[in-house]
Amino acid sequence: MSVSRQRSLAALDRARASVAGGDSSAMRVLPYHPPIVAERGEGAWIVDIDGNRYLDLNMGYGPHLFGHRPAFLIERLGRALAERGPQLGFPTELNAEVAEKVRRLFPSMQRMRFANAGTEAVASAVRVARHATGRRRIVLFEGHYHGWSEAVFHRYHAPLEDLPARPGDAALPGTLGMGTDLAQHAVLCPWNDAASLAQVLDRHRGEIAAVLMEPVMGNGGTVPPRPGYLQAVRDLTRDHGCLLMFDEVITGLRVAAGGAQERFGVTPDLTVISKVLGGGVPIAAFGGSRDLMEPVARGTVFHGGVYSSNVMVLTAASAVLDRILDEADTLYPRLEATAAALARGFATIFEAHQVAHCVQHVGAVLSVFLTRDRVEHLHDYRAVRRHGDFERYIRLEHALAERGVYLHPNMFEPLFPSLAHGPEEIDFALNRVEDGVRGCLRIH
Ligand code: PMP
């Protein structure tokens, strides 16, 4: 494929004149991104405004478990929008309907609230934790991302030299313009190492409100929890009287119907889900036990939002949840097989061409790391940083985009295969990967 990107380039130029940076997420238009302005999604594919088609392995950053624009979802959404309107400003029956379905999959979320994005839901859940424990500090982990709120936005992709010398040192603010809350109240810990967490909880004994983590690291590249790690964290948090909070924005309804808590059998106190829940519309949910959520119910811990739980987002969530509740037994094994086939395929190609790599996945959260040296596993953010060859990955990504396959160019971003990625799509992707590797990576 020889791609022309004339219209995309012109559209970005035009946008830059009135949209700061050309788009409304800091992650989307960056100098190392191929300039692709999207027109539409179709199953496993993205079509750009120049008419180029890409097999999409980013899938909108994760919400599209059923592929882009699945008929069952669009039909229900279209009907609700046409017949009811997106936003009514009153409670609707959808509230209970969706929450009951979420509870069937996430029994730990006895009471929940719907929010508009993962960022909001995490920030609200942190308030719940602080109020419940009467403590201020939050433990965050290197490489983990929980949205851009004042409460938790830390420098999650910090270079190695900027990481704290000691587990439990203050987390660095994630952006200019932040207040002082984070530096005073959030401490940073290496992930996947129970001894480090034990040290942090000792060092800040009696001060920690919550330990907040992605139960499978996703935003620092896909890293599974070591066997027993999540349980050890569960035990430590109980011993120290602090809450365990799983940010399942990525893993919820993806690594298993009931998320990482189902897959690994460890139950947190507070949970946040988002992405797959909405199938592409902006919804998140946070929740926990009835007692923990009681102050939210009473309104003493405030949570609001004009658009929270509107007709559009709850209709989408209801449709997605119906599908998952009806078909989980077949959907998740299919996703698992797709991710495993992609993982094996990438690894086989890299081996054949002697490209140092490490492929890791937990269900359909997958990272294809190119590495500077031979390495068997990457167990935490520092290892990904130390061994990862980010420059080479960008070169591979550009070569693949030229050949009609789209991965996010930042190696920290996982691939999100979907149910629309069948055997033909996998073959297409792997053929192009083989060609791309020949074209740009051969000699290490
Ligand atoms: N938590 C995790 C684990 C995420 O991956 C993200 C988004 N990528 C967020 C929170 C923030 O969600 P949102 O962008 O919807 O605010």
Image: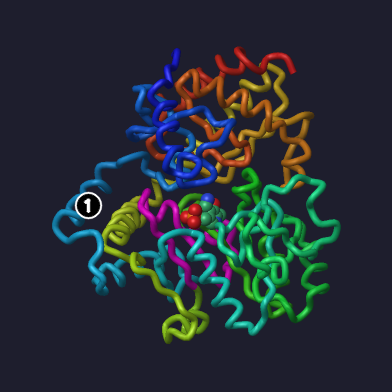
For this view, does 25 lie left or right of residue 241? left
Camera sees residue 333: no
Q: Is residue 279 magenta?
A: yes
Q: Quadrant of the C terminus?
A: top right
Where in the figure is residue 249, as x and y percent of width and height?
50, 56
Give the residue number, with chain letter if any, for mark 1: 76
Q: Residue at x 41, y 37 (%)?
A: 15
Which residue is at a point 68% across and 21% down the rendered structure image?
A: 351
Question: Eyeballing the image, is 283 above or below 398?
Answer: below
Question: Does label 1 point to a residue whose CB lies under 8 Å from ligand 1?
Answer: no
Confirm whether residue 143 shows in the render. Answer: yes
Q: Is residue 122 magenta?
A: no
Q: Quadrant of the N terminus?
A: top left
Image: 91 above or below 422: below
Amino acid at pointer 1: Arg
- Circle 1 residues within 10 Å: few <14, some 14–19, many ≥20: some
Res 211 → quadrant: bottom right
In the picture, measured across the screen, residue 145 lies left or right of residue 139, that is left
In front: 181, or 296? 181
In the image, residue 336 sits, relative to residue 276, either above or below, namely above
Query: Given the current orientation, which residue lies at the most extreme front position?
Result: 17
Place of residue 270 in the rendered image (x, y in percent of width and height, measured from the top left):
54, 70
State the residue at coordinates (66%, 34%): 369
Tally of numbered discs: 1
Q: Nearer the viewer, residue 320 or 115?
A: 115
Magenta span covers which residues? 258-287
Pick out the residue farthest to the left. Answer: 83
Q: Secondary structure at mark 1?
A: helix
Quarter of image, res 308: bottom left
Q: Position of residue 186 (x, y in %)?
A: 70, 67
